[in-house]
């Protein structure tokens, strides 16, 4: 054989081996043009929309409006910025239960029921629900020369704004106009050159420090017609306003200018017992002044003759060091960070598809990667509103939906972005053990919503919303699949075993039938309480077996009592070959199979027959297609279930039709009214599963997409789901 020909054949088989073994490229060894993939979805937002675009580094995030700052709205939030209101009069810290629950049972008793609040404890319960809460750390705005607010009417309609996802650059250009300009300090109004003056603003958030860096280019800034204003609010819980917080309150709300120089001003913020620090560095020649405007203490940055003004504002829980990255170094850091982000981890390219919906689905996938990276890659799991606002749960994170915020990072091979957040389970072992003991159970009982101390917010359904309980088992398995080492086993062992101990002990034995039941549980959507809720029951079957698997991996052998419970745990009733609920109706299984693999409790064969019957019934009802009325994460997880049961077209329809137009121009899911980040994360999880497959998936590329040629799915770097 000719050496050159032999070399070509060897190269061919090497590529085939790499393709099938490593799974880097699912359809062709040709790499995806990731720059083209990402930048065709750069956010271009016309001024008329005026909404905020989140910019952040996972730990810290600022909402930027059409002016490149927060002139008309937008918050500055972080995973470290937590505040608590003072305790009500007459209540001392030792009266606050560290677990968040007042219930304590006698030795040997079990309490299965709502998390009730004793008489006389309502004020404490209210305080625990509200505290701590995430806070708006401050706002940066453009204001008029005299401190008055700019209005929307001051900005002409030809404003343009965009964010380059590849470099993390937000750019906006707009014209400021109005009769008030000529009443300012402009020396010669004729120099205005018409009815207004252009302002160009470039904004970055530093990828490694909690800092905003801005460049403003305009003669208006040079001549003092507009200024940059920095001010700070007292925390509030109102999430239906442009800026969270009360900017006029002075009580328990002190800002101290601790030091200043020609190029820097440092502030210390004292808000009740919460202290944090802010430093602003700026171009030499600019100056900082302060005044009281309309009851608000405001600090102004004046261009003082500079037509190009650069400044960086850093926020920190600790005193800020001498070195603050300037605008240019922040820009360079962003170029490196975001290119590295997009070039590593997973990618899905749908651009060769003929189905006209490919662009919208790809847009949602790309923008969801960006949105979760800037808000959900920090030291704690994210709240429902991410770091964009304060939700009705006060910005606390929820243990039943941590999966939807964080699990996608594993399938997209970006575990390093979620590792610190999901360590909340290890951090909260003491309070989880204490909470279980309070109710008379063994093991670890996880909270519903939680604070950084592990204390839960009082809520009637805390003990009933049980499908939060097995969530850490998902994360343990996902990390083990990425890093199948003894270190990973040890890292999760206490969490896994304590979680399953509680699950087993929580069950109630019906002695007549020798069957274990789940007496009190609440399904997803908080739809009320029931016995043996299907979703919870499926989790219990899977979760207890998962605990046994963990023991076997560690060489410990199976726990006999766990097996005893598994063998006698109630199973789903089957009628006419399909799973039914207590009223004989087909079970809704799509979301259940989306969250976990088939098990002894739910076999794929019976589930598929049940799903077919469900489709027949729903098509004849007023509800229409699957998920059409559910605009949250449930639709995305339902799509995974549909894919597993062979309905690829239904899976795609769920991700597009089922979620409707709930994704705005910035890619933020707003299906439940406000910003709702869990759906963005669930979409990413679903897309990865549908592209890269799952254990037992059909042996073809993109098994969750239709195989009729209308969808050409090219992917790289994704991990197969359990």
Image (cartoon, grey):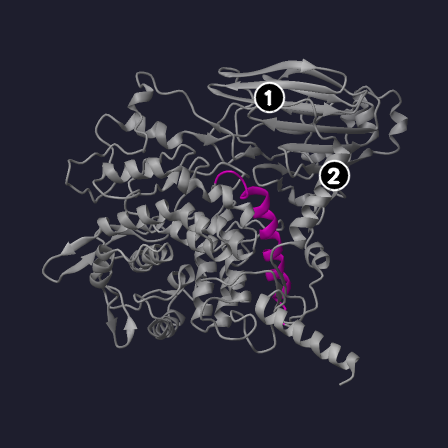
Report the label total. Answer: 2
Q: Residue at x 18, y 43 (%)?
A: 110
Query: What residue sits right under mark 1 in the picture?
Result: 319
State the predominant SS element of the stretch in magenta: helix
Residue at 57% across, 69% down:
21
Q: Is residue 87 visible?
A: yes
Quadrant the N terminus occupies = bottom right
Numbered range of the magenta stretch:
355-380
Q: Secondary structure at mark 2?
A: helix
Residue 146 in sight in this render = no
Q: Position of residue 231 (x, y in %)?
A: 62, 23
From the image, tell me which residue sits under label 2: 331
Residue 577 on image: x %, y %: 28, 76
Judged by depth in the image, the label closer to the viewer, 1 or 2, is: 1
Whichever of callouts 1 and 2 sits on the residue coming sooner in the sequence is: 1
Helix, strand or loop for disc 1: loop
Q: Is residue 396 left or right of residue 334?
A: left
Residue 429 among magenta residues = no
Q: Quadrant of the C terminus?
A: bottom left
**To which quarter of the image does residue 119 belong?**
top left
Classify mark 1: residues with Cα within 10 Å, few (<14), some (14-19) or many (20+): some
């Amino acid at each position: 054989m000719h050496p050159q020909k032999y070399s070509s054949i060897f190269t061919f088989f090497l590529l085939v081996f790499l393709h099938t073994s490593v799974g880097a490229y699912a359809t062709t060894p040709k790499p995806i043009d990731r720059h083209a993939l990402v930048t065709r979805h750069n956010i271009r937002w016309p001024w008329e929309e005026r909404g905020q675009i989140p910019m952040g580094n996972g730990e810290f995030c600022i909402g930027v409006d059409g002016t490149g700052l927060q002139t008309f709205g937008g918050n500055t939030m972080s995973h470290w910025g937590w505040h608590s209101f003072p305790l009500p009069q007459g209540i001392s810290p030792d009266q606050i239960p560290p677990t968040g629950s007042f219930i304590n049972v006698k030795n040997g008793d079990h309490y299965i029921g709502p998390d009730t609040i004793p008489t006389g404890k309502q004020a404490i319960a209210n305080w625990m629900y509200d505290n701590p809460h995430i806070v708006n750390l401050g706002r940066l705005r453009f204001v008029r020369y005299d401190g008055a607010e700019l209005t929307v009417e001051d900005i002409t309609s030809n404003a343009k704004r965009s964010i380059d996802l590849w470099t993390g650059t937000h750019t906006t250009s707009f014209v400021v106009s109005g009769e008030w300009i000529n009443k300012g300090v402009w020396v010669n109004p004729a120099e205005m050159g018409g009815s207004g003056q252009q302002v160009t603003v470039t904004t970055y958030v530093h990828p490694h420090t909690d800092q905003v860096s801005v460049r403003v280019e305009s003669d208006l800034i040079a001549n003092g017609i507009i200024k940059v204003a920095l001010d700070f609010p007292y925390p509030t819980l109102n999430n239906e306003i442009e800026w969270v917080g009360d900017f006029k309150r002075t009580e328990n709300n002190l800002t101290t200018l601790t030091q200043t120089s020609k190029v820097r001003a440092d502030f210390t913020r004292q808000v009740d017992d919460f202290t944090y620090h802010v430093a602003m560095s700026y171009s030499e020649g600019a100056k900082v002044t302060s005044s009281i405007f309309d009851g608000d203490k405001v600090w102004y940055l004046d261009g003082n003759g500079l037509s190009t003004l650069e400044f960086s504002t850093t926020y920190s829980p600790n005193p800020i060091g001498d070195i603050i990255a300037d605008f240019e170094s922040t820009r360079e850091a962003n170029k490196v960070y975001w290119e590295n982000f997009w070039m590593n981890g997973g990618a899905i390219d749908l651009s060769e598809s003929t189905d006209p919906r490919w662009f919208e689905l790809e847009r949602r996938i790309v923008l969801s990667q960006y949105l979760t990276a800037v808000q959900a890659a920090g030291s704690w799991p994210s709240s429902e509103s991410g770091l964009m606002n304060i939700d009705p749960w006060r910005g606390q994170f929820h243990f039943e939906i941590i999966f939807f915020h964080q699990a996608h990072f594993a399938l997209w091979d970006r575990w390093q972005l979620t590792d610190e957040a999901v360590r909340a389970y290890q951090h909260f072992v003491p309070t989880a053990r204490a909470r279980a003991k309070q109710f008379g159970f063994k093991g670890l009982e996880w909270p519903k919503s939680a604070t950084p101390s592990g204390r839960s917010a009082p809520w009637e359904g805390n003990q009933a919303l049980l499908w939060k309980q097995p969530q850490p088992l998902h994360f343990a398995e996902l990390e083990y699949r990425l890093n199948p080492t003894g270190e990973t086993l040890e890292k999760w062992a206490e969490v896994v075993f304590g979680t399953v101990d509680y699950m087993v002990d929580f069950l109630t034995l019906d002695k007549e039938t020798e069957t274990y039941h789940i007496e009190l549980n609440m399904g997803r959507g908080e739809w009320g309480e029931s016995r043996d809720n299907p979703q919870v029951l499926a989790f219990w079957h899977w979760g207890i077996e998962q605990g046994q698997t963990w023991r076997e991996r560690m060489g410990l052998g199976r726990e006999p009592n766990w097996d005893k419970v598994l063998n006698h745990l109630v199973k789903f009733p089957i009628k006419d070959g399909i799973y039914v609920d207590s009223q004989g109706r087909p079970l809704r299984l799509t979301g259940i199979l989306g969250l976990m693999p088939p098990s002894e409790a739910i076999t794929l064969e019976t589930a598929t027959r049940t799903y077919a019957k469900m489709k027949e019934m729903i098509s004849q009802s007023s509800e229409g297609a699957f998920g059409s009325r559910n605009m949250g994460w449930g639709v995305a997880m339902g799509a995974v279930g549909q894919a597993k049961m062979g309905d690829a077209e239904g899976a795609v329809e769920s991700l597009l039709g089922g979620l409707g137009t709930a994704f705005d121009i910035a890619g933020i899911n707003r299906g439940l009214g406000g910003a709702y980040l869990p759906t963005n994360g669930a979409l990413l999880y679903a897309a990865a599963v549908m592209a890269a497959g799952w254990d037992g998936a059909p042996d073809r590329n993109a098994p969750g997409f239709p195989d009729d040629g209308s969808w050409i799915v090219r992917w790289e770097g994704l991990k197969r789901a359990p």
